[in-house]
Image: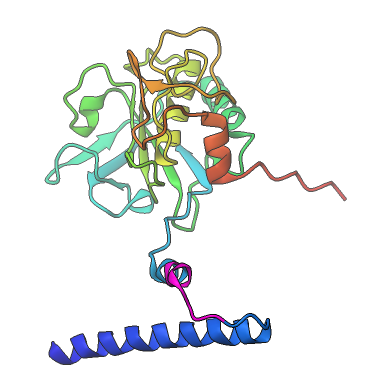
Amino acid sequence: MRRLYWALILVGVLAVGVFAGLVIAKRLREDRWAMPDGDDMVRLRDVFRPAAPRPPRVIYLHRGALEVARGDGGSSQNQSAIVGSAKARYPLRGFTGKDAAWKELTSCVRKLFSPFDVEVTTERPRADGYVLVAFASKASDIGITQRRVGGLAPYDSAGGVVPDPVVFAFSGTLGNRTRVICETIGMEVAHVYGLDHAYLCSDVMTYLPACGARSFRDRDARCGEKRARDCSYGAPTQNSYQRLLSVLGPARAAAAPR
């Protein structure tokens, strides 16, 4: 153990030495000699800081039955840290609406996220690192005792991205209304990209009574549920459109047909 300790110290000293040497060499080439300063040390700290999780670029809508369990395996293993019990497995019925309703729902979700560089698909991706949207009738289907919950998702209150998440939409609680389910999916998926609730009735992220079809609004608004508040990550307001744009980037232009 002591050898490992000294080995780690040696690696750190060597890293600092190499970095300082590179800084000095660069400044000599630029004919502006100066010893490495505090700003250089900040940049060195950034080199060793763990990288933030990459935002999932695929949103997968799983229509059929599905069994989920508590765990850290993420979307590819149908595991979530927000289901009720670590000792239970939860069989979900999936989306029970007809083909026309499913088509309408998927089209609606695609439209919500169409401004951003993310794909909405109904086929499970082969690679890890995607958002899995699972359908159940009510929250108790995943061991959650809250009655009037339309959807659930993991959320980083500091505003960070949650990698490999499972998001739930409870279509029975939402009265099997396609548009409401769509907007709930939009809210829950946006939570995994770091968005808080918005105190704006026309925004997807709101709990306020509906005032028309909702979308991710390009407008600064207070966060909150029944009353306005600062956002959980410290900002006084949130622009849901611009915040998603900063995380995902703009939608890529479709390739021209040949």
Q: Quadrant of residue 172?
A: top left
Look at the image and tell me whether residue 249 can be seen.
Answer: yes
Give me the residue at 19% from left, 29% from top.
144
How far from the left and from the top, in percent, is residue 205?
A: 44, 24
How many numbered marks does the figure carry?
A: 0
Q: Give the x, y percent position of residue 114.
A: 63, 34
In the image, what residue occupies the spot 21% across and 18% down? 147
- Residue 119 shows in this picture: no
* Image quadrant in which you'd find residue 90: top left
Q: Position of residue 140 (x, y in %)?
A: 20, 26
Residue found at the far right of this picture: 258
- 232 on left or right of 57: left
Q: Is residue 212 above or below residue 123?
A: above
Q: Is residue 32 left or right of residue 67?
A: right
Residues in magenta, as a range: 34-42
Given the current orientation, which residue lies at the most extreme bottom position? 3
Quarter of the image that includes the N terminus: bottom left
User: Which residue occupies the foreground of this view, 2 or 176?
Assistant: 2
Provide residue 26's location: percent of width, then percent of height: 61, 83
Scheme of image coloration: rainbow
Identify the residue at horizontal 30%, vertical 90% (top origin): 10
Q: Is residue 181 above or below residue 134?
A: above
| Magenta run includes residue 171 | no
Q: Is residue 234 above or below residue 74?
A: above
